[in-house]
Image (spheres, rainbow, N blue to C red):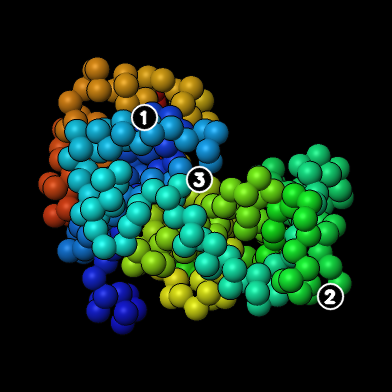
Amino acid sequence: MDKTSTQTPVKGRFAPSPTGRMHLGNVYTALLSWLSAKAAGGTWLLRIEDLDPQRSKYEFARQIEDDLHWLGLDWDEGGLDGHGPNGPYSQSRRHDIYMEYFGRLRDSGLTYPCFCTRADIMATQAPHLSDGRVVYAGTCRPAVMPSHDEEPARPHATRLYVPDESITFTDMIYGPQSVNLARECGDFVLRRADGAWAYQLAVVVDDALMGVTEVMRGNDLLQSAAQQIYLYRLLGFKAPRFGHLPLLCNAEGRRLSKRDSSLGMDELRRRHSPDDIIGMAAAAAGLIPHPVPTTPAELTATFSIKTIKTEFQINLL
Ligand code: GLU
């Protein structure tokens, strides 16, 4: 453990996108980030990541809060009522804040306008990574960094230049990581052509301004941590510690999704008590040997991040 982590109180967070009802996989992520913060005597924050205006619904956010309360996963700061000193805690209400930090990057000449459509990007010879993501080929990247007063009138996304440089960090669960920004990420979008803020910019600005010291989330975002660490550096913020969790899989070995309705909170709440569900999530993580009823508070006594299993599969119940 490094010096700062023993001095700064831990602040963890859960940052769901309100695009549907939670399932056991989301409960598991919420539980582990809650436990990691609480076992260290820290606090836990809830942020609503409703950046996507088409897919985010207030009703889903309300339902997520209700499910968390019912499970005994209470937050010290944030949520829809926005209690705490660092609000608002819904991303849809933070436009002016993102604009300010985006403006700093743009005014420093670190961004450029991009006119490529999705089809253009898919049609280029950009390297296709093994997980299906495409590294932007740099079609709109100017040879000379543009001056910010040349903002074009026609609709465009805004991308960040990334250098041919590797970002290294130690993940709390997966250990040492090294990600080359140019080869594995490419120049990434900060603001979409429709004006919506990109997740990468919003998550960094929010975690930094909200004082988050520990980010625990699914391992589908492991590589994003490199892009985020780079943004922390450009904006002059201290990066938090990252811990990425293996994703829960269904009986066919596929990542849980909304289609696995038997593991959705609607069905789970009909058939089980909160303690049953916490027990299932804790057993899936390897915190307890068998899924027996338990509470988040009981699990704090023995919680150790080292016991989290990185390879597992749970059977449909
Ligand atoms: N909002 C993201 C999601 O629900 C999580 C982002 C994060 O934890 O950094 O998948």
Pointer 3 local density, CA inside 10 Å: few below 14, some 14–19, many at least 20: many
**Residue 239 percent location from the top left of the image:** 44, 71
Question: Mark 1 vs ligand 1: CB under 8 Å?
Answer: no
Could you tell which of marks 2 and 1 lies nearer the N-terminus?
A: 1
Name the residue: 46% across, 26% down: 258
Quarter where residue 200 is shown: bottom right
**Residue 268 percent location from the top left of the image:** 29, 23
| Camera-side residue of 61 and 308 | 61
Name the residue: 46% across, 75% down: 237
Residue 170 visible in image: yes
**Residue 55 percent location from the top left of the image:** 52, 33
Quarter where residue 38 is shown: bottom left
Quarter where residue 269 is shown: top left
Mark 3–mark 2 Cα distance, whole angstroms, equals 31 Å
Q: Mark on residue 59?
A: 1
Image quarter where the C terminus lies is top left
Callout 2 amino acid: Val
Query: What residue did someone put label 2 on?
Result: 144
Name the residue: 55% across, 33% down: 54
Hey, which residue is sitting farthest bottom in the picture?
A: 3
